Amino acid sequence: MTDTDLCFLDAREALRLFRARELSPVDILEAQIARAGVVEGRVNALAFTFFDEALEAARRAEARYAGKDGGPRRLEGLTLAVKEDTAVLGKPRTFGSLIFADNLADHTNPTVAGLVDEGAIIHALTTCPEFVWPWTCTSRLHGVTRNPWNTAITCGASSGGAAAAVAAGTTTLATGSDSAGSIRMPAAMCGITGYKPPYGRNPGSPEVAMDPFFHIGPMTRASGDAALVQNAIANGPHGARDPAHVPGAPLLPECPAGVEGLKVAWSEDLASHAVSQAVRKNTRQIIETVLAGASTQEIATPWAGDLLDAFPAWGGMIYADEFSDAVERHPDLVCDYTVTFARHNERYTPRMFHDCMKTIGDAWLKFMPDLAGHDVFICPTVGTTAIPADLKDWEQPVAVDGVDHDVHSVIMTPAFNAFSRLPVLSIPSGFDANGVPTGVQVVGNPFDEETVFRVAHAIESAMPLYGETATRPPLDE
């Protein structure tokens, strides 16, 4: 096994080899450190690194596998990259902004704390755009983060650094956060698995715990690895810190049953989004071939357009003060898109926020019977792969098959933040001609996480990535 193979080893296989004493956590960490030295100049996914500290932890993990210090825990020795807006005690927490360039976290996010309790080793924090708002991963603090499959294209955002690091092989596991698609959108762009759990399942930091649109979840190269991480998060001891936490999560199988007999509803464009022919083709191929053993039905989604129009009022009201304060107090430090968003958010009123909440309720009443009559709903995650890494998406259009569109019309994730109790997992669905992956979202009924992973496993099995050089990003070429 080469050092590059070690970088892309599945978490479950790494744990098996650790337990058999055929591989050490130190081996994988050293390989990923070396790989970061090679690829980070092109990808720029790691905002901060703690390699020396992590190597000490890896050696302690190695000792646990030798029977010392109580033996190995559930995630013992696996590398973990954390999105840098997520608190890790004593580590930088800048929110991608020069304003907070010297800020250190005063606590550890309870989800991250649970993973560390289980033996995961934090060796890096990953990049995000300033105040985690745009759909491209760029900031004055971190620069531009690029897609490992095609560095001219964005890795997505806001958990773009996490997705790029997983895809580039510089970490085994990562966490991201998702209020409108910030886990799933970059997961789709980078060809990895990204999971938005049901609201309340994964504990969040107190300052965001009561926002039902906000979720923290795993980002991995395989759905089985995401299940492994999700099991550790949802059943960890830190849920009491989040007043919205829903305990008692069932354990997700890492190798679930097939899709035979399942009922699958689907749409290729939600009737309201701009979707390229390549994304449509790959979505249909998943439905017609991979899910051939299931009963599939294309359904109408008249509610999606209403949500697309109403959704900005949520973010505008929730984050208006944060952006306005940053612009007013630190005009010389903020990014230009922060100024744009601050001005944009000024238009929203409490009445518009109330109307947004009503629109969500009305949309759910339209979607709920279709979803309840099926086991899952599937649609694309992002409508195009043609989003340049340095595109100013807050002021420039996105081209979909040569036609310009507003970026929000190609992001197909926010509706499922509004329907917050639904588990949603983005999984690769194929590739576009530019070498960039496409993805589909597998949406489950409220809190039915197991079925979502069951369908994702079937899709992934038909198109495995990362196991061989030919199915990895071409960064070594």
Image: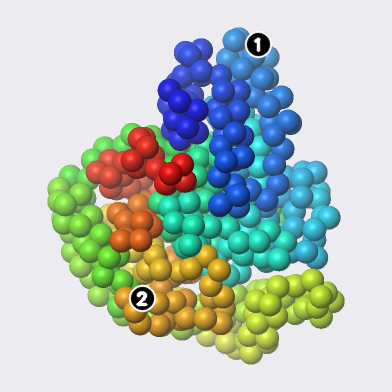
Q: Secondary structure at mark 2?
A: strand
Please say if the residues under marks 1 and 2 sit with CB atoms less than 8 Å apart. Answer: no
- Measure how far apart labels 1 and 2 are at the Cα level: 56 Å
Please name which of the two marks, 1 or 2, marks the residue nearer to the observer.
Answer: 2
Q: Is residue 118 left or right of residue 155?
A: right
Q: Which residue is mark 1?
A: 68
Residue 324: x and y, percent?
Answer: 75, 79
Closer to the camera, 160 or 108? 160
Q: Is residue 273 above or below residue 174?
A: below
The quarter of the rendered structure image containing the C terminus is top left
Instruction: Indicate the quadrant where residue 65 lies.
Output: top right
The quarter of the rendered structure image containing the N terminus is top left
Q: Which residue is mark 2?
A: 400
Residue type of the residue flagged with mark 2: Val
Q: Residue furthest front?
A: 477
Instruction: Indicate the quadrant where residue 433 lies.
Output: bottom left
Q: Which mark is residue 261?
A: none
Q: Secondary structure at mark 1?
A: loop
Instruction: Indicate the quadrant where residue 288 lies.
Output: bottom left
Q: Earlier in the sequence, mark 1 or mark 2?
A: 1
User: Who's the residue at 56% across and 23% down the image?
Assistant: 27
Q: Is residue 266 visible?
A: no
